[in-house]
Amino acid sequence: MNKAITSNLRPQLLGRMTQRAIVEALKSQGPISRADIARLTGISPTTVSSAVTQVLNAGYIEETDAEISGPGRPGKILRLAHESVQVIGVSVEPEWCEMVVGGLDGSIYKDRLLKFLTPNTYGRLLSEIERHAKPWIDTPNVKTLGLGLSLPGIIDPSGDRAVFSPNFHQTDDQRPSHDLHDRLGFSTILIQENDALCLAERRAQLTGDLAIIDYGGGLGLGVISGGRLLGQHIGLPRELGHITIDPNGTICGCGNRGCLETLATDATFARRVSAKIGRTVTIDEAIRLATDDPSAFHSEIEAVIDYLAIAVAATANLFAPPLIIMHGRLLNILPNLLECLATCATVRKLRPFREKCRLLKSTSTKAQGALAGILDHLFEELGPLLPTNA
């Protein structure tokens, strides 16, 4: 650590940075001892011991016996808290809301997962989130430290206001994180849904460089580069779906015609299937029908894949990420659809990017991303990262 930097830091700030360093060591290494933390961080054992006490008292970490066989008393190890505290992740989408609960180590409690229908008013949405979370918040001997809320659309750069959502207007110009904080009494953050997916996949894929394309109801884009989310200012790079592809096309939820998301999503596929069979079907039903008989809906699948390839190629040409992750359901209809999408996208990429930008299907949910978002927020509140030597 650079002494010229630390010499100007106030002791209180340096103490917070030490606490953050302890948490970061546990995040990267898992359960370890105080001595291990001192060795990994280069901080003196005395300073580590003092900071550990403070982080234990804050509830961020827990102390337990080491699982070591042999004679003598087992030593003590530290781990990120997952028994005495919890955090909540909530994703809100036009049809469904999902809620998950987990520990500070990122683990998800399998017995605390639920989905409920999305209310049609803002007030009812807040009430339903509070109602479903309350039994978990009231769990004896467990403290809830925070809630992350994932929303579609454009989020104010401060993260405090939902500005506009083309497909979910209940939250337009509202402050759901502020309002939920008032109801629940603990830290609550708002995160754009594609950013949430990025944070979840960063954990799942163990990489800080990726893009995610969410092609469910709308068409959204999130990008992480060097471990940091891009485009925190209003609108970019999330609104890939509102690039005009067909000026005379279908009216989009944003009010324009022929946006890419009217052509390249699960919702588009459901509309095409509805037109083919002569009755309106949901996305779930359209996917089920096509999974049962893919050949009957070959042209509908192919049409959406062609436009989805435009989104993939545009992402590659704009950001050149090493990994592009697709979040949606259409690609699950047939085992080779991801490969077909990759082939279609390759011819639209600029030549230097054709062998890059590996394509994968997502393994995470937006609720898990919301949980990852509140974890990042809590750790950042604990203190800034210690500077490292160049």
Image: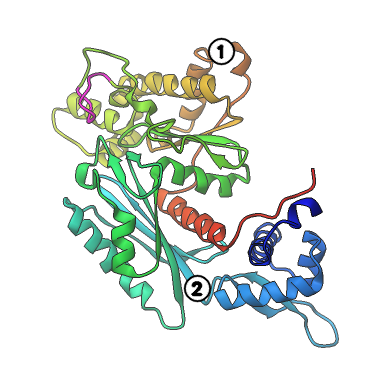
Identify residue type, mark 2.
Val
Question: How crowded is the residue under tag 1: few (<14 C-alpha within 10 Å), some, or many (20+)?
Answer: some
Circle 1 residue: 350
Which of 18 and 325 lies nearest the eye of the viewer? 18
Label 2 element class = strand
Residue 364: % across, % down: 48, 48
Q: How crowded is mark 2: few (under 14 residues within 10 Å), some or many (20 or more)?
A: many
The magenta segment is 251-258
Q: Where is residue 68 in the image (x, y as percent from the top left)?
A: 78, 77
Is residue 252 magenta-colored?
A: yes
Q: Does the magenta stretch include residue 203?
A: no
Using residue 303 as the reference point, say whether residue 52 is left or right of it.
right
Earlier residue among tags 1 and 2: 2
- Give how far apart the Cα atoms at labels 1 and 2 are: 48 Å
The percent coordinates of residue 330 (x first, y second) are 38, 33
Residue drawn at (18%, 58%) of the image: 124
Classify residue 173 as left or right of residue 342: left
Q: In this rendering, is residue 310 above or below 324?
A: above
Q: Is residue 358 above or below residue 90?
A: above
The image shows residue 274 at horizontal and vertical percentages of 19, 29
Q: Is residue 365 visible?
A: yes
Q: Which residue is most to the front?
A: 8
The overriding secondary structure of the stretch rendered in magenta is loop
Q: Residue placed at 68% from the left, 66% from the top? A: 11
Q: In which quarter of the image is residue 257?
A: top left
Question: Which residue is identified by label 2?
Answer: 85
Which residue occupies the foreground of this view, 57 or 367?
Answer: 57
Q: In which quarter of the image is the C terminus?
A: top right
